[in-house]
Amino acid sequence: MSSSGTQSYDVTAQSTAPPAAVWALLLDARSWPSWSGVGSLEVGASQGLSADGRDGVGAIRAFRTGKTVTKERITALDPERRFSYEGVDVPVMVDYQAAVELRETPGGGTRIRWHGTYRVGRGKALFFRWYLGRFMRAMATGLAEHAGGPARRP
């Protein structure tokens, strides 16, 4: 695939929940369909999922959205602070790297920053910048709201 340069997204959301509650949702791949834009967790296509909902570094989580299945590997965990992952099999995108950073806010809530970089084929960059910006903003907001009530605008 001939590709254009590296693209990126960087979105934030505020949750009234403490970082521990937000962190628990990120680690539990089975929770993602209830708060994110993904339709389902494909357990059979995933590897290393934890039975207790606390997936570790190296776990590969396969998520289905519509007809598309993406596989992402957890690359680093800094508990209640940073959740990092990379695309293993992400249709259309290559070199996908992302992280979710959590910071406790005064008052006990959590600021969620979800950011990533990727490359796509020529002619797809503008669409993906628009699409992923919207999709990932909805992911961050869904995470914030599911963890602890309505999200506040940062």
Image: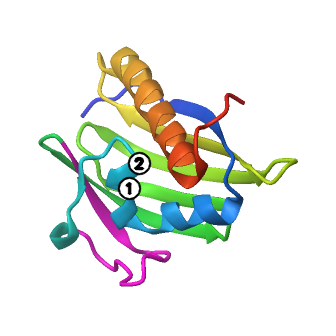
Q: Residue at x 30, y 46 (%)?
A: 38
Query: Which kind of residue does numbered mark 2 sit on?
Result: Trp
Coordinates of residue 147 in the picture (x, y in percent): 56, 54
In this rendering, position of residue 139 left or right of residue 94: right
Predominant secondary structure, magenta span: loop
Does the residue at mark 2 contact the one at mark 1 (Cβ under 8 Å)? yes
Q: Residue at x 34, y 65 (%)?
A: 30
Q: Which mark is residue 49?
A: none
Q: Which residue is mark 1?
A: 32
Q: Residue furthest left?
A: 67
Q: CA distance from mark 2 to mark 1?
A: 6 Å
Local secondary structure at mark 1: helix
Image: 71 above or below 54:
above
Local secondary structure at mark 2: helix
Query: Which kind of residue does numbered mark 1 sit on?
Result: Trp
Task: Give yes or no for residue 66 being in the magenta stretch.
Answer: no
Image: 58 above or below 146:
below
In this rendering, position of residue 22 left or right of residue 26: right
Provide the residue span drawn in magenta.
46-65
Q: Which residue is mark 2?
A: 35
Residue 17 location, quadrant: bottom right
Q: Is residue 26 visible?
A: yes
Image: 120 above or below 35:
above
